[in-house]
Image (spheres, rainbow, N blue to C red):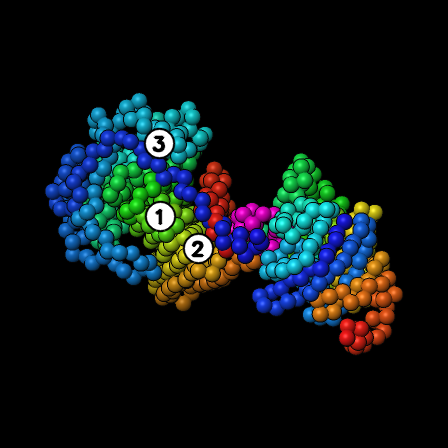
Amino acid sequence: MLKIKNLYARVGEREILRGIDLEVKAGEVHAIMGPNGSGKSTLAQVLAGRDVYKVTEGEVRFEGENLLELNPETRAAAGIFLAFQYPVEIPGVSNMYFLRAALNNLRRQRGLPELDAMDFLELVQQKMQALEMSESLLNRAVNVGFSGGEKKRNEIFQLALLEPKLAILDETDSGLDIDALKTVADGVNSLRSRDRSFIVVTHYQRLLNYIIPDFVHVMYKGRIVRSGDKSLALQLEQKGYAEMDDAVVSELV
Amino acid sequence: MGGADSIEQLTNQEYKYGFVTEVEEDSVPPGLNEEIIRTISAKKHEPEFMLEWRLRAYRHWQTMPEPHWANVHYPPIDYQKIVYYSGPKGKGLRPRSLDEVDPEIIRTYEKLGIPLREQEALAGVAVDAVFDSVSVATTFKEKLAKLGIIFCSFSEAVQEHPELVRKYLGSVVPYTDNFFAALNSAVFSDGSFCYVPKGVRCPMELSTYFRINAQDTGQFERTLIIADEGSYVSYLEGCTAPIRDANQLHAAVVELVALDNAQIKYSTVQNWYPGDKEGKGGIYNFVTKRGKCLGVNSKISWTQLETGSAITWKYPSCLLMGDNSVGEFYSVAVTNNYQQADTGTKMIHIGRNTKSTIVSKGISAGHGQNSYRGLVKILKGAAGARNYSECDSLLIGDKCGAHTFPYLEVRNATAQVEHEATTSKIGEDQIFYCRQRGISTEDAVSMIVNGFCKEVFRELPMEFAVEAQKLLSISLEGSVG
């Protein structure tokens, strides 16, 4: 589904991604871990098409297509979804209106008929129940005045509604208490399927107790330095990134 | 090809009302002197009192300096180069029916989406069409006349209802009020007149559509609306002009009078030619609009969407004289490219328990400069007066500006005055968030801007609200950067 080859990206003069290789097949869940500043979030944003980051080298193919040539909305239509680490507030625009505009834009780009207000409402109510989201959030402006937990839940709710092929979760666990974490993880798990893949970016392995990954990758200084199964995450938890650091450095040297 | 770049491309749609209509115009030579004023008055077969009033205004105007306190910048205007009267050549004083109107002019209004033929006209909207200096057609006149409502061109009102004109003309905006009001009083050529009798609720929206066509012409129209005791009227005003390289002056005066328990709702969608992307050409829109809540429990609401003009300089205001009277001002002003706007309102609380609400939304894009200037004045006798003001600015890009100049004068200790102001920016992060969800940059901007203006748009009559949203997205297309 997704093939990243030797990807380099920078912000201004600063090189952040320095040769990423990663392949994600349909239905797989990949966790990307690493210390702060290792480039995890940058990778997520580059895949979604944020133009603050300039790709200087490498290739990304999504279902055979050259992803780097597509603008962000076309990538969204192709089936890429990013759950933001910091969901953005849009004052004056109701969450309901925003979601319907998003869904109908995607449906149009995918050649499907648009949903009218009634059908949309029905769909929304069905998805909300699963995530234990309060309906009042729908009538408020997008993310404005939402608590940290509400914002993250709103991201997963959008994920459920927009039904992407590849969902990238960028530190969805940060700022969540354990109950909220469980709800969010349950939401994600209910969306796992044979043809939907996930890239779960996280700093801590805590989330991976609830969303069990098929693969775990460790990023360090803009590269993937280790890959393994879920036991790698546990190892990291025990040893910490500091030891990882020494190990990696010795490997690299 | 992401957020940052496309934000810059987002407000470059051409002005689509910029065509010129080929009609034979009857104009006076450029320049201003007593002779010209006599000629204008004679062309309109005006009674003596009108000519006298014009001449007094002219003589007063000559003693006044052009004001320069607004936060707008433009080269000096040569008042001797302006043509003060221009109208399509017609058979008589004014056309008696639409069949006498030049078909070219009817086609012009059709192109602008304003059908003048009554059977085709929007249900529930009566239109007075003003072409350059002359009112060319007023629809639904008979139907309104049955209710005793007078809705006609100003020239016609001068002929047929001189007593009303004489009583109220200049009673809200005297010719001594300001430089442009004095100029307008001297040379105004036409406009709309409306009188709603006691206890009548006007069953349809009344609307005037202003069009400047001729070159080097100033448009100086005058609108006078009187709502007698217990009556209600909702009035709409729309404006467009062709694309011209030279700046054109538009100095209108609008006077509203609301008697006891009467209510006037006045809505404007102003879309005069704003000039090109480099700031060349466009209309100077220097307008005096004021309403007088003369009676107890009367109410005047101004709602405006200002998207056009090179320079907009206007402050629709309310004199709250009657006890318990209410003044409202809802405004969206957009400046893109090199447009400048200095707009706001004055709420003068004179009567007891008078209330006013001000909601002003300024949107700046490109190199646009947007200023809110508002005065809330509470006089000694205005016990229990209340005001709420909210001024919000939205910036698109980093070359534009927003300024707020609130003035407050409170002379009564029982008054309550509140003022809130915010400035926000459409951020690259908001646009990217929307795009990641499949919403294009254009749609995202339009969604955010409409969300920002929601409070004002819901004050507009339905037909206008839809038009306003469309106009807003057109004026901002290409502005995001």
Disc 3 from disc 1: Cα separation: 21 Å
Badge 3 and badge 2 both on one subunit = yes
Q: Residue furthest top?
A: B99
Q: Is residue B38 left or right of residue A163?
A: left
Residue picked out by circle 2: B366
Mark identifier at residue B429: none
Crowding at mark 1 (Cα within 10 Å: few <14, some 14-19, many 20+): many
Residue picked out by circle 1: B275
Q: Earlier in the sequence, mark 3 or mark 2?
A: 3
Disc 3 from disc 2: Cα separation: 31 Å
- Give coordinates of residue A14: x percent, y percent: 61, 68
Residue picked out by circle 3: B108
Report the span colored magenta.
B429-449
Q: Look at the image and say whether residue B433 sits in the magenta stretch.
A: yes
Q: Is residue B290 left or right of residue B83?
A: right
Disc 1 from disc 2: Cα separation: 13 Å
